[in-house]
Amino acid sequence: MPEPSPEAIEQLFQQAADLPLEQRAGFLDARCNGDGRLRVAVEELLDFDAKVKDDPEFLQGPTAGFRATLPLSTAMPASFGRYRILRICGEGGMGVVYEAEQDNPRRTVALKVISPGLVSLEHAKRFNHEAQILGRLQHPGIAQVYDAGFVEDGRPYFAMEFIRGMPLDAYTRNRHLDASARLELMARVCDAVQHAHDRGVIHRDLKPANILVDESGQPKVVDFGVAHVAAADVLRTVSRTHTGELLGTLSYMSPEQIAADPSGLDARSDVYALGVILFELLADRLPYRLDKLPVHEVARVIREQEPSRLGSVDAHFRGDVEIIAAKALEKDKTRRYAGAGDLASDIRHFLRGEPIVARPPSAIYQLQKFARRHKALVGGAVGVVAALVLGLIGTIMFAVEADRHAETARQNELEARSQTYRARIAAATAALGNHDVSDAARQLDEAPEELRGWEWRHLHSRLDDSSSVFSVKPGEITRLVQSPEGTRVVAFINTAVRLLEQDGREVLSRSFTGPRVWISFDQFSGRQPRIADAHGNAVRIVDLQGHIGQQVKAPPGMVPEIGRAHV
């Protein structure tokens, strides 16, 4: 395995040091993932940290979010003015932080003495005025600046509220906060930063280590004073060391801040840092992969490379949360939230299930950003696209001409079918006028089906001129007969006969022994029908009551034929 980086060792140590002793071994088993060198390095730091705690020169436990992880080179003075030094809490490029006791009023403070190279003589003249401004930052989410001044050797100091708590990232991990709780905590941090922005104070060095969460769960932003006093001169005079290092933590710097241009810094630079912190709290990683990159490459990535989408790291954050984080991380500060309060407002909109103000970047804007990043590629692509467009135009013109000819042919065919339809309708009308129903039906059947309209339906309805329609029994033979009451229908089959009205109502029904029957109305029967049935070689005429009125025998060799209507 490759040699573990100092950053990885330090990060893992900070996380392990905040855990109870009995939980550290299991934590290192999971996080080191078999990397023995990484584990040995972290355990050495943990052993050193334990020795520091046992040393009588130090008080036990972390304070103000600082932990002594390496031997400190600064000798601890007994006091600075009215502040009695209790112990060194931490030391870094910005200066030294002491836990101190103020004599009047008696209270414990975090005393930060700034390194002498960070503040110029010119800026020291404005120090007292700026310290008064910082002292007016009264907000529950900001570690208050109680006092500011200069120690005997001319170095400026700040006496700040002493916070007993953990850095923001460590707090969320150790308390196992879910995404909603982390978002709510982040909104409270934004409220505190907005309070400072409203009073003209920009932090310039926001990061989880500068946001402590106390025992009550209240986040506190620390080091407002240090960043405000030191940033302008550092960026103007000693912004880069011989190794190219920038003031502050590179991973959280905005593109305009990493360019070391003080005129480009405003409240939106803090919004960018808050966006990085928000991304880190939710995804447990930074939006850029900056591990082991040299400083100049880190600066290039932050200025030019697009950050990872939050939803690509964890699909649960696709949608509104991803859009909120992306807006805060816009490289163009004019497209970011105007202030930390706007970021807090959108976070709370999401938590309440309300529409957010931020919107995803348009396709045109994303295309413009891509073109700026890849000019050569886009130039070549434009040439290829132009050639394709010209070829496409020619193809389209040819296709349009072909479509025009096809449309002309289609119109001609439609006109021919329309003429055929009109001719068929005219022929069907003439056939019906001549009472030739069969020909009318044929003409209508040959009319084009897709053109048939109301006139076709009207003529088709005239093909059937029946006065009435009704059903008969299977096998029955029907005949029309005249009676004094008008035309009636006789239906007969085998040895049964029925007399029906024209609407199908049954007038009478009789069964006989003969194989065939018939019914008749004539001048001899008057209003009563006469019914005949065949019996052997004789035909019998009977009335409705079955009385035989007459019987006629057929000559030898002849068979009676009955079954036709008779008038």
Image (spheres, rainbow, N blue to C red):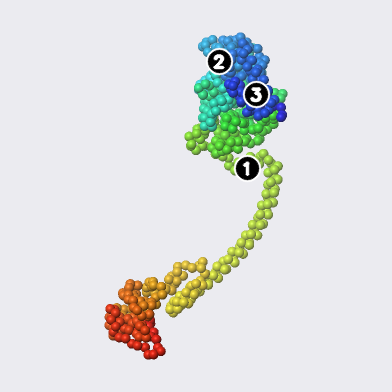
Quarter of the figure with residue 165: top right
Answer left or right for 314 relative to 565.
right
For the question of whether residue 272 can be seen, the reply is no
Type of amino acid at the residue the image marks with label 3: Glu
Q: Is residue 280 above or below residue 520?
A: above
Answer left or right for 499 relative to 351.
left
Residue 109 marker: 2
The residue mark sitting in front, 3 or 2, is 3
Q: CB under 8 Å between callouts 3 and 1?
A: no
Type of amino acid at the residue the image marks with label 1: Leu
Residue 10 marker: 3
Type of amino acid at the residue the image marks with label 2: Val
Q: Which residue has dot 1 on it?
A: 367
Residue 406 locus on image (x, y percent): 61, 64
Depth check: give the residue in front, 42 or 273: 42
Instruction: State the residue at coordinates (61%, 23%).
Output: 24
Q: Earlier in the sequence, mark 3 or mark 1?
A: 3
Instruction: State the residue at coordinates (33%, 72%).
Output: 505
Depth check: give the residue in front, 420 or 16: 16
Give the distance between the C-alpha atoms of the residues marked 1 and 2, in whole angstroms.
52 Å
Q: Earlier in the sequence, mark 3 or mark 2?
A: 3
The residue mark sitting in front, 1 or 2, is 2
Q: Is residue 246 above or below residue 475?
A: above
Quarter of the figure with residue 101: top right
Residue 119 locus on image (x, y percent): 64, 19
Badge 1 element: helix
Instruction: State the residue at coordinates (55%, 33%).
Output: 337
Answer left or right for 263 relative to 219.
right
Depth check: give the residue in front, 235 or 281: 281
Image quarter where the N terminus lies is top right
